[in-house]
Amino acid sequence: MPEGQGSFGRNKTEDDITAEVLARFSGTTDPRLRQIMLSLIGHLHAFVKEVQLTEAEWFQAIEILTEAGKMCSDKRQEFILFSDTLGVSMVVDLLDHRKPDGATESTVFGPFHRLGAPDMKAGGNIAHRDTTGVPTLVGGRVLDLDGEPVAGALLDVWQTQSNGLYDAQDEHLEELHMRGKFYSDSEGRYLIRTVLPVNYPIRRTDRSAVC
């Protein structure tokens, strides 16, 4: 591991620091990790220099990240939400899951996907506890690139409640809610009973951290 910044010595310019950090990581034995770290350091240092980041601004960023980490749990992942709001999640997903022309575009799990959603039959109601939302049916067909039905395709469904919260955000709800796994039939058809989805807010802490 590279040594702490105190070992860089005195009378160094910002470019000297960048060069020394890059030199220390250049000995990383894993080729892919070396490529990632050298590029990350180069871009990160270039950003700091371009915007002339102040100590106060950098410390505020550290505080925001620290606060986000404290809010994370097995049901809630704030750093994924950071990634989503910055568009990074979608870029990574698109790069890692190239699709042929005509295929449904790729998308991300998002910060509120949870494992353990129940298997449900066609027409099953994922919103059976939500009594205030507008009843809604969602149906369609899953087809391959030739227009032929895909039988047994898994549709892992989740959405906000009518109060604008996912179950992981709702302090009064411990169990999985508004989630279900559906499978297409022999003709590729699926049917989901729910309530009309609503927009959900990206809340902010008193330090303006996205949560």
Image: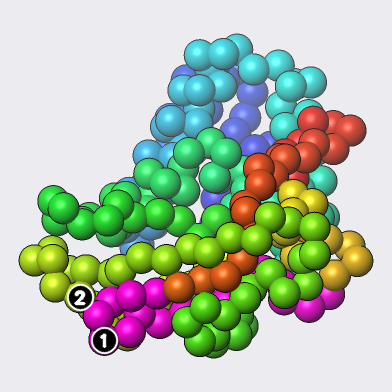
Q: Are marks 1 and 2 in contact (CB under 8 Å)?
A: yes
Q: Nearer the viewer, residue 11 or 50?
A: 50
> What percent of the width, then of the height, locates residue 193?
57, 70
So how many labels did they put on this image? 2
At x 38%, y 50%, the residue is 92
Q: Nearer the viewer, residue 127 or 26?
A: 127
Q: What secondary structure is marked by label 2?
A: loop
Name which quarter of the figure residue 165 lies in: bottom right
Please tell me whether residue 195 is drawn above or below residue 120 in the rendered image. above
Three-letter residue code for mark 2: Pro
Q: What secondary structure is marked by label 1?
A: loop
CA neighbours of label 2 inside 10 A, class few (<14), some (14 to 19), many (20+):
some
Q: Identify residue for label 2.
A: 149
At x 13%, y 66%, the residue is 147
Task: Specify whether residue 23 is in view.
Answer: no
Q: Nearer the viewer, residue 7 or 51?
A: 51
Q: Identify residue for label 1.
A: 186
Residue 3 tag number: none
Would residue 97 be counted in the magenta stretch? no
Task: Specify whether residue 89 is in view.
Answer: yes
Name which quarter of the figure residue 129 lies in: bottom right
Q: Earlier in the sequence, mark 1 or mark 2?
A: 2
Q: Is residue 202 left or right of residue 136?
A: right
Q: Quadrant of the N terminus?
A: bottom right
At x 46%, y 42%, the residue is 88
Segment tinted magenta in the rendering:
174-190
